[in-house]
C-alpha cells in the first residue's frame, strides 16, 4: 500500500459484505477502491470459523449472492469449506484481487472536516478515502467471558472462532462453554474423540432437525444447464421464509406448534427425563435463534457427555466450577460464547466529525439510518449495521439490499459533484430508529422471555430487523437526500441536500421527488 494512497472508496472487510460491496462498486463503474482485510485471505467469518462440524444453517442456494449463483453446491446445507471456497471464487470471477489489501487491519479512521475525507491508519500503511464502507460484520470479534481463575488454568483455552487445529483433543477431558449455533455443531463433531465432554449450558436452545442431504449430480447438472431451475429453487426457499416472518414479528403465540415439533425432536433422542428437563427451554421458540441439528441431542445422550445446566463461574487450577457448584476436571476449555455484536470493536476506531468515536456515539445503543448511516459520520456506511439482522432467513438478502443503498449513495455523491459529503441528519436517524423499535415491541425477540445476544446492555434490540426482507429492500432501494445534510469542502458549510439536487433528481427520475418517499418500515 502506498504511503499516502487516496481512493474514492475504502471497504473494510472481505467477507460476504465486503466482497459484495466490491462487486457492486465495479458494476457502478467505480474502480478506484480498495478492500482492507486484516487477515491474509478473504472469507470473513467463514475463514475464521473452521471448527469441526462448522456449517451454515441457511440452505445453500439461498446463502449465496443472487448475482453469483452456484449450481454446484454439494449439499443442501453447505459446510464452512465450501462457503469459503465460494467466496474465493467470487473474488476471482469478479476480478477483485487487485483491490484487496491483506494484512491491513484498520487501526484508526478519522474524518477530516476540511478535506471531506477519511484518513485511515492500518497495519499495512496509511491511506485516505472519500467514502468508507465498513463491512467488518457483527460475528468477527470473539467474546470470552471474564471468568475468575481463567488466567491460571494450566490446560488449553480457545474460542470456537479461533480453533487451535494443532491441539489434539483425542483422549482429553474437555469443557464446552455455551450452547449456541457453534456449540451444537462442535459437540457432535468432537464427542467421539474426547475422553469426556462437559457442556456448560446457561440457557438451553430450541433445536429442530437439520434436514441435510447431498445434492445429486443430476440436480447440479440441471442447474448448470438450466439456470432458471436454481433461481426457482432459491425463490421457493426465500418465499417460505418470508411467509414465516409474521409469526416472529406479529403473532409469536402461533409459534407454540413449532415448540411441540422441537420437543418431539428432543424426545426421540433423549430418553432420560432428567436430561430432557435440563434441555427444555422455558422461553418462546424464536426468542433466541432456532438452531438446526440432527446430531446434537444424540451426542448429549452418550455416556461420555455431561450436561451442566449452569454457566461456568470459576476455575481452580484444572477444575472448572459452574454457578450451581458442579465441578469437573478438564484438560481443555472451548468457549462457544459468541461475539462482540452490540459493542463491535471497530466502533472504537472510527472518529467522526465531532471528534468522538462511533462507540461513544453509540453508547446508549447502536442506531443508524436504514441500518447504514450514523449521524456525525459523513460518507461512512456500514453493511450489516444496526437492526439489519434476521432470525429466520439468509443475511445475504439483507446484504444485497444494503449494497443497493450503498450504490445509490455513491451515485448521488457523483450527481452532487465536487468535494461533497453526506451526513445523516440526527432527526432522520432518530425517526427511523423510533419506527423500528416501535415495531420491535411485539416481536418474539422482545416478548419471548429470553436474554439473547440480540439485546444490548440496556435490553434494547439493536440487531434484528422486525419485518420481511422485501420490506427492507424497498426501504433501502434509494437514498432519500432529505434525510442527509450536504457538506461542501470550500467553506465547510452544510446545505439542504434535497434542495440542492432537486433539479438533477427531477431530470433523472421524472416527477419523483427525492424527499417525497415514506419509509416502508411503517408498513
Image (tube, rainbow, N blue to C red):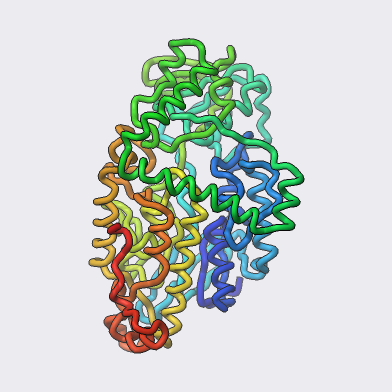
Residue 149 seen in this snapshot: yes
Depth check, front residue: 435 or 150: 435
Q: Position of residue 237 (x, y in %)?
A: 54, 47
Please tell me in which quadrant of the rendered image residue 173 appears: top right
User: In which quadrant is the N terminus drawn?
Assistant: bottom right
Q: Residue visible at 58% across and 73% down? A: 27
Quarter of the image containing the C terminus? bottom left
Residue sitting at x 46%, y 24%: 200
**Residue in the foreground of this view, choosing between 422 and 121:** 422
Residue 65, picture quadrant: bottom right
- Asked if 418 appears above or below 215 in the picture, the reply is below
State whether residue 5 appears in this view: no
Name the residue: 31% across, 64% down. Answer: 519
Left or right: residue 390 versus residue 75 is: left
Identify whether 506 is placed above or below 276. Answer: below
Q: Is residue 369 left or right of residue 133?
A: left
In the image, residue 129 above or below residue 53: below
Horizontal arrangement in the rendering, residue 316 relative to residue 365 (left or right): right
Left or right: 472 in relation to 228: left
Residue 457, horizontal then vertical, whole percent: 30, 43
Q: Residue at x 46, y 56 (%)?
A: 398
**Which of the two residues, 253 or 180, is positioned nearer the viewer here?**
253
Residue 466 vertical placement versus 28 (above, below): above
Residue 508: percent from left, percent from top: 42, 85
Q: How many marks?
A: 0
Amino acid at each position: 500500500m502506498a504511503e499516502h494512497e487516496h481512493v474514492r472508496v475504502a471497504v473494510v472487510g472481505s467477507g460476504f459484505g465486503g466482497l459484495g460491496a466490491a462487486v457492486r462498486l465495479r458494476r457502478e463503474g467505480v474502480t478506484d477502491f480498495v478492500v482492507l482485510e486484516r487477515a491474509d485471505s478473504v472469507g470473513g467469518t467463514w475463514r475464521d470459523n473452521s471448527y469441526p462440524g462448522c456449517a451454515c444453517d441457511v440452505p445453500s442456494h439461498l446463502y449465496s449472492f443472487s448475482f453469483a449463483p452456484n449450481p454446484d453446491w454439494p449439499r443442501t446445507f453447505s459446510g464452512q469449506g465450501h462457503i469459503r471456497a465460494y467466496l474465493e471464487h467470487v473474488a476471482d470471477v469478479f476480478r477483485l484481487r487487485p483491490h484487496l489489501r491483506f494484512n491491513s487491519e484498520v487501526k484508526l479512521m478519522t474524518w477530516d472536516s476540511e478535506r471531506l475525507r477519511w484518513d485511515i491508519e492500518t497495519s499495512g500503511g496509511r491511506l485516505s478515502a472519500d467514502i468508507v464502507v465498513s463491512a467488518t460484520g457483527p460475528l468477527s470479534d470473539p467474546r470470552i467471558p471474564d471468568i475468575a481463575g481463567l488466567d491460571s488454568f494450566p490446560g488449553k483455552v480457545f474460542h470456537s472462532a479461533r480453533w487451535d487445529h494443532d491441539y489434539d483433543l483425542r483422549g482429553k477431558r474437555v469443557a464446552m462453554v455455551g450452547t449456541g449455533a457453534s456449540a451444537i455443531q462442535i459437540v457432535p463433531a468432537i464427542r467421539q474423540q474426547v475422553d469426556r465432554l462437559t457442556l456448560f449450558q446457561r440457557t438451553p436452545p430450541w433445536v429442530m432437525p437439520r434436514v441435510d442431504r447431498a445434492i445429486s449430480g443430476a440436480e447440479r447438472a440441471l442447474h448448470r444447464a438450466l439456470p432458471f431451475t436454481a433461481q426457482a429453487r432459491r425463490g421457493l426457499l426465500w418465499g417460505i421464509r418470508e411467509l414465516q416472518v409474521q409469526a416472529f414479528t406479529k403473532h409469536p403465540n402461533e409459534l407454540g406448534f413449532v415448540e411441540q415439533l422441537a420437543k418431539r425432536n428432543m424426545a426421540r433422542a433423549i430418553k432420560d427425563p432428567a436430561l430432557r428437563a435440563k434441555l427444555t427451554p422455558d422461553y418462546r421458540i424464536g426468542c433466541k435463534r432456532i438452531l438446526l441439528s440432527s446430531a446434537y441431542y444424540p451426542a448429549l445422550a452418550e455416556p461420555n457427555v455431561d450436561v451442566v445446566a449452569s454457566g461456568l463461574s470459576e476455575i481452580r487450577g484444572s477444575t472448572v466450577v459452574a454457578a450451581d457448584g458442579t465441578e469437573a476436571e478438564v484438560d481443555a476449555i472451548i468457549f462457544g460464547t459468541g461475539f462482540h455484536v452490540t459493542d463491535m470493536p471497530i466502533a472504537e476506531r472510527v472518529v467522526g466529525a465531532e471528534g468522538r468515536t462511533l462507540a461513544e456515539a453509540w453508547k446508549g445503543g447502536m442506531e443508524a439510518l436504514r441500518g447504514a448511516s450514523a449521524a456525525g459520520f459523513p460518507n461512512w456506511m456500514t453493511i450489516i449495521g444496526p437492526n439489519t439482522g434476521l432470525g429466520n432467513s439468509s443475511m445475504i438478502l439483507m446484504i444485497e439490499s444494503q449494497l443497493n443503498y450503498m450504490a445509490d449513495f455513491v451515485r448521488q455523491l457523483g450527481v452532487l459533484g465536487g468535494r461533497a459529503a453526506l451526513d445523516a441528519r440526527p432527526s432522520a436517524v432518530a425517526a427511523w430508529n423510533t419506527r423500528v423499535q416501535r415495531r420491535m415491541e411485539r416481536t418474539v425477540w422482545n416478548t419471548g422471555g429470553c436474554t439473547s445476544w440480540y439485546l444490548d446492555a440496556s435490553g434494547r434490540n439493536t440487531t434484528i430487523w422486525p419485518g420481511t426482507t422485501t420490506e427492507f429492500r424497498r426501504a433501502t432501494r434509494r437514498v432519500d437526500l432529505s434525510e442527509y445534510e450536504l457538506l461542501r469542502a470550500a467553506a465547510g458549510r452544510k446545505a439542504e441536500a434535497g434542495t440542492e439536487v432537486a433539479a438533477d433528481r427531477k431530470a433523472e427520475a421524472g416527477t419523483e421527488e427525492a424527499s417525497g418517499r415514506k419509509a416502508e418500515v411503517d408498513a
